[in-house]
Image (spheres, rainbow, N blue to C red):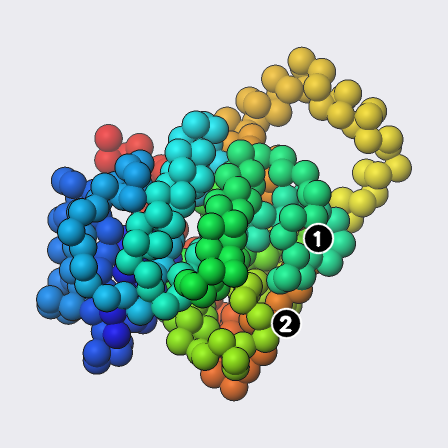
Amino acid sequence: MNYFVTGATGFIGRHLVNELLKRDDATVYALVREGSRGKIDDLARKLDAGERLVPVPGDLSSEGLGIEGFDQPIDHFFHLAAVYDMEADDETLERANVEGTRHVVQFAQRVEPAIFHHTSSIAVAGAYEGLFREDMFAEGQKLPHAYHRTKYESEAVARNELGGGDIELRVYRPGVVIGDTETGAMDKIDGPYYFFKVIQKLRDALPAWFPLAGPEGEKAWLVPVDFVAKAMDHIAHQPIDDLPGDTFHLVDPDSLSVGRTLNEFAKAAHAPQFAMRVDSNLTDIIPKPMRAGLAALPPVKSIRRQVLGDLGIPESVLETRDFKCDFDARDAQRALKGTGIAVPPLSTYAPKLWDYWERNLDPDLFRERS
């Protein structure tokens, strides 16, 4: 079985390659930029892949990835390469997520794999309100951030260029991806990790029994990276006739609210918890134009910027932290039924995530080293 993978050395990509190589007959061809081959070599050593993980020099920014002379038959083509950075500028996101996908599809059409697996994101739902099903896509939703927009346009490229053609298309929309449930390992500070420093400061300043008040928020939609990789690997290898659809929301159907999620991490950190969580809908009694006007006042913006800066939280994280919709995942759940592949309760692995962050990602560690 031959696979072609973009983003093989990325966070999800490394876990997926590990799953693919568990098949004895698997050979994985991995796109790698010139000068970055060492990353693939390191991954091959870590996974004991030998010659079954093959680097293919190319570049997302080039037409057809700039690859010439590749003539290996490919059964499954996985596209995971993307920029996920809420602080990245629009041009960077556009170049990687949209133009990059267009170039990947060009190459895939030349290689003609049996199935093209596109890794999208629940971000395509943007500010949609209500139930967002797996068969929904272009619903007129607002896309409030460049990341939402470019992930939406990336999926649109795959659908427009491959949908209904000779190459079967399957789309995976993971939730907010966090660390491994077994090791706690995570690549970088992102999503809920931005609030870990706040939790740490509260732990250092207050006793664990001290009750706090905080927002309840919408659902957090967190998913561990090992679940995402295992789910993609399983669904990818199922015959199309055995699948209920071609798009899969890889989310936790029992997702906790933001408030309850923060409490799980506070518990793992032995920090005070939010005993009273305020429903964010209560702010709706203030008309939206008035709320927007207050938030736009220079003194308010200045204070907000100062507080967030002191805590190391980008403003974009607060602007995009809540999804207003529920993500229906019944097709993914049906595809995974009976496999044991499921998102475990956050309480069972939150301590590992916290421990890994405190030992490896806490910004204070890097300040001390420098």
Residue extending furthest left?
51
Classify the position of the N terminus by image quarter.
bottom left
Residue at the image position 36 percent from the left and 68 percent from the top: 114
The answer to whether residue 46 is left or right of residue 1 is: left
Is there any visible trace of residue 9 in the rendered image? yes
Circle 1 sits in a helix, a strand or a loop, which is it?
Answer: strand
Residue 335 image position (x, y, % from top left): 53, 77
Q: Which residue is mark 2?
A: 330
Using a 10 Å C-alpha cutoff, classify the residue at mark 2 as few (fewer than 14 neighbours), some (14 to 19) or many (20 or more): some
At label 2, which amino acid type do we have?
Arg
At label 1, which amino acid type do we have?
Cys
Task: Name which quarter of the figure residue 257 lies in.
Answer: bottom right
Residue 262 image position (x, y, % from top left): 59, 53
Circle 2 sits in a helix, a strand or a loop, which is it?
Answer: helix
Using a 10 Å C-alpha cutoff, classify the residue at mark 1 as few (fewer than 14 neighbours), some (14 to 19) or many (20 or more): some
Along the line of sight, the residue nearer the viewer: 335 or 301: 335
The answer to whether residue 54 is left or right of residue 193 is: left
Along the line of sight, the residue nearer the viewer: 91 or 188: 91
Q: Which residue is mark 1?
A: 325
Residue 364 image position (x, y, % from top left): 35, 37
- Give me the disc on residue 152: none
Residue at the image position 70 percent from the left and 43 percent from the top: 140
Residue at the image position 54 percent from the left and 67 percent from the top: 246
Residue extending furthest top?
298
Residue at the image position 47 percent from the left and 28 percent from the top: 90
